[in-house]
Image: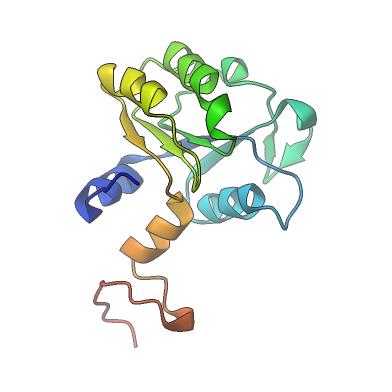
Amino acid sequence: MPDYSDEFLKKILTRTRTIAVVGVSMNPVRPSYYVARYLGLKGFRVIPVNPGHAGKMLFGQTVVGSLEEIEDKVDMVDIFRRSEAVPPIVDAALEAFPELQTIWMQIGVEHPEAAARAEARGVDVIQNRCPKIEYQRLFGELRMGGFATGVISSKL
């Protein structure tokens, strides 16, 4: 598993405003649903991407069928698909968003060749991590269940 510094992850999560979540589910028990919902609650604009649910509403946004349908600037593409599905998603993201800053592949999702293509274009790539977990860990929110965040908070 690639190793990323906390500073690198925090920089990405701090600069990101709009996230296209590829493979988002309408089912509230699916990780892609609650991760996208959490990110939206934290102030990120989440654009749900899933061809099977295109046109439906999720978290106040219309689900789009593909990255190419998004007309707004996207800072991060968060991929909830199997590793073998990653290359065309990365290629579509690089084509659709000239100012893209980050490709983020969820836990269990890795594709070194696609990552290298994105990095060659100056895009930061995170593999096999979850932005919700990293956000909670880095911004001092994981306190339940004995998680040690490594972040000292003044909250009581």
Residue 55 in view in this figure: no
76 sits to left or right of 52: left
143 sits to left or right of 10: right
Viewer-side residue, 75 vs 117: 117
Viewer-side residue, 117 vs 149: 117
Image point (70%, 32%), residue name: 63
Q: Position of residue 62 (x, y in %)?
A: 70, 32
Viewer-side residue, 50 vs 39: 50
Image point (72%, 58%), residue name: 29
51 sits to left or right of 19: right
Query: According to the image, what is the colour scheme of the structure?
Result: rainbow
Q: Position of residue 124 (x, y in %)?
A: 30, 32
**Vertical side of 100 occupied by 106: above or below:** below
**Vertical side of 139 occupied by 142: above or below:** below
Q: Quadrant of residue 65?
A: top right
Image point (47%, 80%), residue name: 144
Viewer-side residue, 149 vs 4: 4
Q: Position of residue 33 (x, y in %)?
A: 66, 49
Residue 45 in view in this figure: yes
**Vertical side of 90 occupied by 56: above or below:** below
How many numbered circles does the render carry? 0
Q: Residue furthest top?
A: 95
Image point (41%, 70%), residue name: 141
**Vertical side of 126 occupied by 73: above or below:** above
Looking at the rendered image, the quarter that the C terminus falls into is bottom left
